[in-house]
Image (cartoon, rainbow, N blue to C red):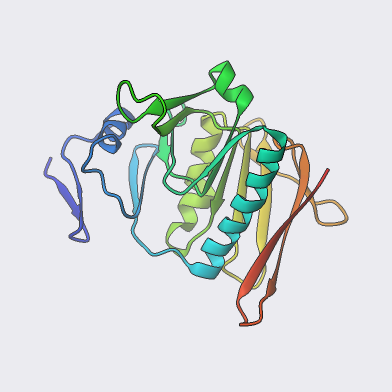
Amino acid sequence: MATIVFEESLEIPDGIRTLADFRRWTYCEDFPENGRIDYVKGRIEIDMAPEAMYSHGRPKVELVVVIGQLVKQLSAGDIFTDRMRISSVPGEVSAEPDLVFISNDSIESGRVKLIPKAAGEEEDFIEIEGSPDLIVEVVSDSSVAKDTKRLPKAYFDAGVPEFWLIDARRQTLLFRIHRRGKTGYVPQRPDRQGYQRSAVLNQRFRLDRHRDSRGHWQYDLLHAE
């Protein structure tokens, strides 16, 4: 098999046929630093599109700030964003979600394992292996089917208890918390105030938005017990 060149700037080495092959590639120094490159159920999915500022970047930052403060206050674990890779053999997935939360219990029980950058570098980790407690994806124009169909299936098979999906590209804002059902994720029904319950964080959440003084979308992640 010949080397695959994508947009003349990214080369996929010959011989990557399995999740294990892909993960070995991600550990290499020449693995691309730009773009998002995921392995999902036998597919290598490449997204080199720039991040939309107000429909992707801003809502993601709001979640990182609010959930980060909440997790810190509760001393519940760690959250990561962007270039933190999660991998699961049962899920056949290696991806870089928009936000990942792993609890102290998951680490202590061995449900997730932190993979070090190199042997002997136990304080420098580059990958989460196993089943994180919570994963969030923010939909982009270039990744609609992946974010709404292929990744949720992979995360479910990986055993991830909770999956959040945000789509802020249209006039109607979509914010949906999903919990595990028998065969897939089940969206949680909002209460009368529009809040949805997160069993993982033991809080109810609502994502609102409004125009700022320049006419751009601003986001507010509200939460209550």
Judge whether 131 appears above or below 177 on screen. Answer: above
**Location of the N terminus (image quadrant):** top left
- Which residue occupies 50% across, 51% down? 147
**Location of the C terminus (image quadrant):** top right
- Which residue occupies 54% across, 50% down? 137
Which residue in the rendered view is the most extreme toward the left? 2
| Place of residue 184 in the rendered image (x, y in percent of width and height, measured from the top left) | 61, 36
- 114 left or right of 3? right
**Quarter holding residue 161:** top right
Tell me if I can see residue 189 in this picture. no
Tell me if I can see residue 198 in this picture. yes
| Place of residue 131 in the rendered image (x, y in percent of width and height, measured from the top left) | 53, 29
- 98 left or right of 40? right
Which residue in the rendered view is the most extreme toward the top? 109
Judge whether 64 appears above or below 142 on screen. Answer: above
107 or 9, which lies in front? Answer: 107
167 or 83, which lies in front? Answer: 83
**Quarter holding residue 6:** bottom left
Which residue in the rendered view is the most extreme toward the right? 192
- Which residue occupies 33% across, 59% down? 48
| Place of residue 174 in the rendered image (x, y in percent of width and height, measured from the top left) | 66, 60
Q: How many marks?
A: 0
| Place of residue 204 in the rendered image (x, y in percent of width and height, measured from the top left) | 78, 46
